[in-house]
Amino acid sequence: MSKRLSKVSEAIRDELGDIIIKDLKDPNLKLVSISRVEVSADLKHANVYFTSIKVEPEKVAESLTKAKGAIKSELVKRVRLRYTPDMQFFEDKGIEHALKISRILKELEEKE
């Protein structure tokens, strides 16, 4: 990923987190964190990955998708880009996978 794409992804991630916390009133989004954003090379599309503590990921993705218009209009004000990317929301399973690997390694260690 180029330096510019990395900076844009980071700026969008930071602002999305702030928008979700301060501007959206959906109870499904109370304990949601934006873990990463992957922006396409033309900056027209972004995959947004989130983690959620108490709410099912499907409900979080649905709430974020419903609020996409409000999120995008607020993002336009905060991040100066020629195009504000169209966003798709996905659960970030990286933490879940890391915990699973850690558990497996611990079990293997205990067997030895």
Image (spheres, helix red, strand yellow):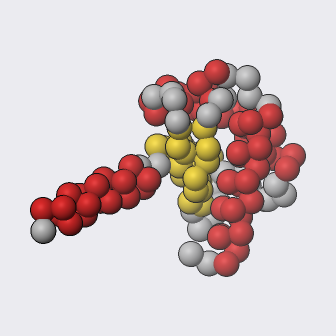
Q: Quadrant of residue 3?
A: bottom right
Instruction: Identify the residue shown where x is 81% and y is 40%.
Output: 74
Q: Nearer the viewer, residue 6 or 97?
A: 97
Q: Is residue 87 above or below residue 8?
A: above
69 lies above or below 42: above
Locate residue 50: give its quadrant.
Answer: top right
Q: Quadrant of the C terminus?
A: bottom left
Query: Which quadrant holds residue 67?
Result: top right
Q: Is residue 84 visible?
A: yes
55 horizontally vs 12: left or right? left
Q: Image point 58% across, 56% down: which residue? A: 36
Left or right? Give the position of 56 relative to 28. left
Residue 61 visible, this angle: no
Residue furthest to the right: 77
Residue sitting at the far left: 111
Judge from the rendering whether residue 25 lies leftward or rightward of residue 104; answer left or right: right
Residue at 80% across, 34% down: 22
Residue 75 drawn at (x, y percent): 78, 45
**In the rendered image, the vertical position of residue 9 relative to residue 57, given as above or below:** below
Residue 34 in the image, given as x and y percentages of width and height = 61, 48
Quadrant position of the N terminus in the picture:
bottom right
What is the count of numbered marks? 0
Q: Position of residue 24 (x, y in %)?
A: 74, 28
Q: Position of residue 55 (x, y in %)?
A: 51, 27
Q: Nearer the viewer, residue 105 or 84?
A: 105
